Structures are given as structure tokens and as C-alpha cells.
Image: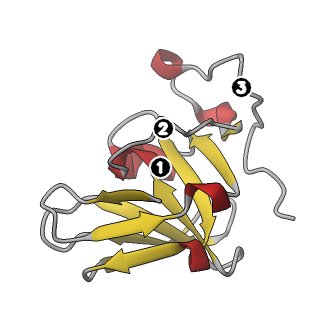
Amino acid sequence: MTEGGCLCGALRYNCDEVAAVTALHCHCKDCQRVTGSGKATVVMFPESAVSIRGDYKTFSSLGTDGSHVNRGFCGNCGSQLFTFVDEIPGHVFIKAGTMDSSEWLTVDLTCWASSAPDWLTPDPAIPAVPQNPPVN
């Protein structure tokens, strides 16, 4: 099990890294804005593999590709931890930077490479797609 949480410690989670579906670097403009950086690194899990302790607030928006995105964040310190996408039911994306330990993590894909900033170009060793990968 991997644990993680927000900056102030009010929101914590456990996730079963063995159940991770995929890990992505996302360079979409929304991820750039919410992280204040050039990308978000997220790990997709079945919701059943994640246990959340504490209350989080949600901000919902329409993604660049039209998906319905619900971002979970700590109402106290503002740390963003979770993303739920209506079009991918039963799954949650967890921001890798919120994990206490992420040495086990391997990024499988870079998405939205077409909007990566020049100062943070995608790693050529990681497969990349110009926008979102297909949802299967």
C-alpha cells in the first residue's frame, strides 16, 4: 500500500499500487493551471483500490476535450489530490506528487504533448500522444 496526502495533513489516502491502471504526464492547459507547472503526473486507480480519510472539496469543469472533470482538493490548504472524470466511471486519478513514496511509479504515457510548454518538453523516452489517449 502507498499512502499520501495534502500539505496540511487533513486529507490522507491509501492506494494499492499493484492495482494502478496507468501513470501519465499530462500537459493539457487545465493540468498546467491547476498545478502551476507545465504538467501533472497522475496515476489512475480503480476507486475500489483507494481509501480516502478526511473531507475534500470538488471543483468541476469541462475539460479541453469536452470531458466532465471533477478535481478533489483539501479545503484547508488547497492541495489538489484527486481527479474524477465522469467518462471514466469507477476510477480516480491521484496526483503522484501527493504520494509519500512514489519510487515504484513508472510513467507509461505523456498526453496532451501538443500543448507542452517549450520549457518542459515531453521526455522522448516515454510514448506520447497529442491529446487524450483513447478510453477503452
Which residue, given by chain and number where applicable, does mark 1 sit on?
31
Q: Residues within 10 Å of mark 3 (few under 14, many from 20)?
A: few
In the rendered structure, the answer to whether residue 75 lies left or right of residue 97 reads: left
Viewer-closest of 74 and 10: 10
Q: Are marks 3 and 2 in contact (CB under 8 Å)?
A: no
Q: Earlier in the sequence, mark 2 or mark 1?
A: 1
Q: Which mark is residue 39?
A: 2
Q: Amino acid at mark 2?
A: Lys
Task: Of the two numbered discs 3 and 2 on the same chain, state the one appearing first in sequence.
Answer: 2
Judging depth in this view, the residue of 100 and 43 nearest the camera is 100
Q: Earlier in the sequence, mark 3 or mark 1?
A: 1
Q: Are marks 2 and 1 in contact (CB under 8 Å)?
A: yes
Q: For mark 3, what is the residue?
A: 126
Which quadrant of the rendered structure holds the C terminus?
Answer: bottom right
**Dot 2 crowding, Cα within 10 Å, few <14, some 14–19, many 20+:** many
Instruction: Point out residue 46 in the picture as x, y percentages from the top left corner.
Output: 64, 72
* Alpha-carbon span between mark 3 and mark 2: 14 Å
The amino acid type, in three-letter code, at marker 1 is: Cys
Residue drawn at (70%, 74%) of the image: 88
How many marks are shown on the rendered structure? 3
Q: Left or right: 112 with respect to 95?
A: right
Q: Amino acid at mark 3?
A: Ile
Q: Which mark is residue 104?
A: none
Mark 1 surroundings within 10 Å by alpha-carbon count, few (fewer than 14), some (14 through 19), many (20 or more): some
The answer, for residue 57, to whether it is visible in the render is: yes
Q: Nearer the viewer, mark 3 or mark 2?
A: 3
Classify mark 3: helix, strand or loop: loop
Q: Is residue 1 left or right of residue 66?
A: left
Residue 59 in view (yes/no)? no
Q: Position of residue 120 (x, y in %)?
A: 49, 21
For the residues marked 3 and 1, what is the alpha-carbon distance in whole angstroms?
19 Å
